[in-house]
Image (cartoon, helix red, strand yellow):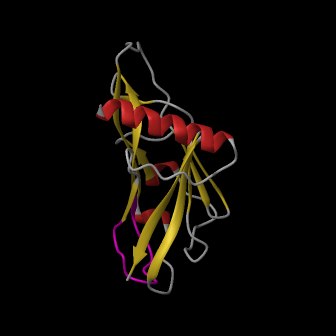
Amino acid sequence: MKGSIATGLAALAAVAAAAGALAVPSPAHPVSITLSSSKAGAGNVGLTLRMPTVLQCGRPRGGPVVLTLPRAAHVPRAIGLAAVTVNGKPPSTVAVKGRAVTVGLPVPHGIMCDSLVDGVLVIAIAPSAALRNPARAGTYRATVQQGHESWSVPVTVR
């Protein structure tokens, strides 16, 4: 029963995203963002994004992940590949446009099996990327998007 509910919610999210709704929170598939420091105005803050995904042979699939941080946060003009990991591996690309950070999934090398399982995609942005928290305490919204799925994720700064 739980699987069919999750499948139904995922289908509903896909339909809503295709209809133009960009922020589709899904209780069956929580997405979270954790900061290395939640202090207002803190600089050189590390960020960890966790989101559900399908893993093929233990590797994440799908297109790039776009993380759009709140207006009040500082995002540098560029983030180097060395400052980002995807499930512990280097990403294929990292691009910054305004507040949006686009992370390309690692390109698989070698033979791929056909094992597909639900899993977790973890994108870690190191403090060396020079992200900075908003100057004022509060709860802000970040947006995470991969393909047609999108989530609005609360981020609390104290």
- Residue 105, given in percent of the width and then of the height, sits at 50, 37
- Residue 34 percent coordinates (x, y): 36, 63
Kindly identify the residue that appears in the image at 53 percent across and 39 percent down: 12
35 is higher (above) or lower (below) than 107 = below
Farthest-out residue, bottom: 136
Give left or right: position of 145 versus 34: right
Which quarter shows the N terminus?
Answer: top left
User: Hey, which quadrant is residue 96 in on the image?
Assistant: bottom right
Residue 92 visible (yes or no)? no
Say above or below: 58 vs 104: above
- Where residue 42 sits: x, y (%)? 42, 80
Q: Judge whether residue 82 can be spotted in this image.
A: yes
Residue lying furthest left: 1
Give residue 98's position: percent from left, percent from top. 67, 63
* Of residues 155 and 83, the one drawn nearer to the viewer in this rendering: 155
- The magenta stretch is 35-48
Q: Which quadrant, please, contains the C terminus?
A: bottom left
Q: Residue at x 41, y 52 (%)?
A: 31
Observer-nearest residue: 92 or 123? 123
Residue 123 horizontal side relative to residue 69, left or right: left
Residue under the point 70% across and 47% down = 20
- Examine the structure image and report whether residue 17 is included in the region drawn in magenta: no
Secondary structure that dominates the magenta span: loop
Count of marks, rendered view: 0
Residue at figure coordinates x 50%, y 29% from the top left: 107
- Looking at the image, the residue that sits furthest to the front is 1
